[in-house]
């Protein structure tokens, strides 16, 4: 079997997106949800634990699955705050715009993830177009289904044939 080489096929745009933007968006949604209770709940150690949980579990397991309408995560050392959706030491965020008990209608998980997904997919689309104009249409085989933030989810197929050194 001969060696397999992959080279850079397009010039990077340095577009900022990805993991750190998910973290920032999650923290902003958390602060918005807590409102006037933010200072009481988000003490430095508590915030660090919540963000670590998001980074290590929620972010990795988010699938935009219609069968998972909400997600609960621990907020250590806090009392129940009904208007913030904190009960028994857990906050619940929803995937869809659906009411949870006495909470306002929310679709927070999609508001956190989908704008970042959309940005990543647009960057990929730009690179695919750049490779096509440089090496010819079809030189890079990637198919990404149409992205629609109103759809039940997103799906992607990864490349079948990578761009090889000319």
Image (cartoon, grey):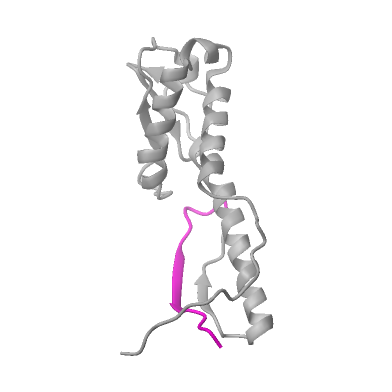
Frontmost residue, 2 versus 82: 2
Frontmost residue, 1 versus 16: 1
Q: Magenta part mainly helix, strand or loop?
A: loop
Q: Residue at x 59, y 48 (%)?
A: 115
Image quadrant holding the N terminus, namely bottom left
Q: Residue at x 43, y 49 (%)?
A: 64
Left or right of residue 38: residue 126: right
Q: Residue at x 69, y 81 (%)?
A: 133
- Queried whether the magenta region covers residue 159, the answer comes back as yes
| 58 is higher (above) or lower (below) than 149 | above
Left or right of residue 58: residue 112: right
Q: Is residue 69 visible?
A: no
User: Residue 134: where, in percent of width, then height?
Assistant: 67, 82
Frontmost residue, 77 versus 166: 166
User: Residue 72: where, in percent of width, then height?
Assistant: 36, 30
| Residue 121 found in image quarter | bottom right
Q: Residue at x 43, y 25 (%)?
A: 48
| 40 is higher (above) or lower (below) than 155 | above
| 22 is higher (above) or lower (below) than 106 | below
Q: Which residues are magenta?
A: 149-166
| Residue 161 found in image quarter | bottom left
């Amino acid at each position: 079997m001969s060696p397999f080489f992959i080279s850079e096929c397009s010039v990077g745009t340095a577009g900022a997106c990805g993991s750190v933007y998910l973290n920032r968006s999650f923290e902003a949604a958390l602060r918005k949800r807590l409102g006037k209770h933010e200072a009481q709940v988000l003490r430095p150690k508590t915030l660090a634990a919540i963000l670590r949980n998001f980074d290590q579990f929620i972010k990795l397991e988010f699938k935009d699955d219609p069968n998972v309408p909400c997600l609960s995560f621990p907020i250590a050392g806090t009392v129940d705050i009904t208007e913030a959706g904190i009960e028994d030491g857990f906050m619940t965020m929803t995937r869809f715009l659906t009411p949870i008990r006495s909470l306002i209608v929310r679709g927070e998980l999609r508001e956190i993830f989908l704008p970042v997904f959309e940005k990543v997919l647009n960057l990929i689309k730009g690179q695919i177009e750049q490779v096509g104009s440089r090496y010819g249409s079809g030189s890079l085989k990637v198919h990404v289904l149409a992205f629609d933030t109103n759809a039940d989810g997103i799906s992607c197929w990864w490349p079948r044939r990578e761009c090889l050194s000319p």
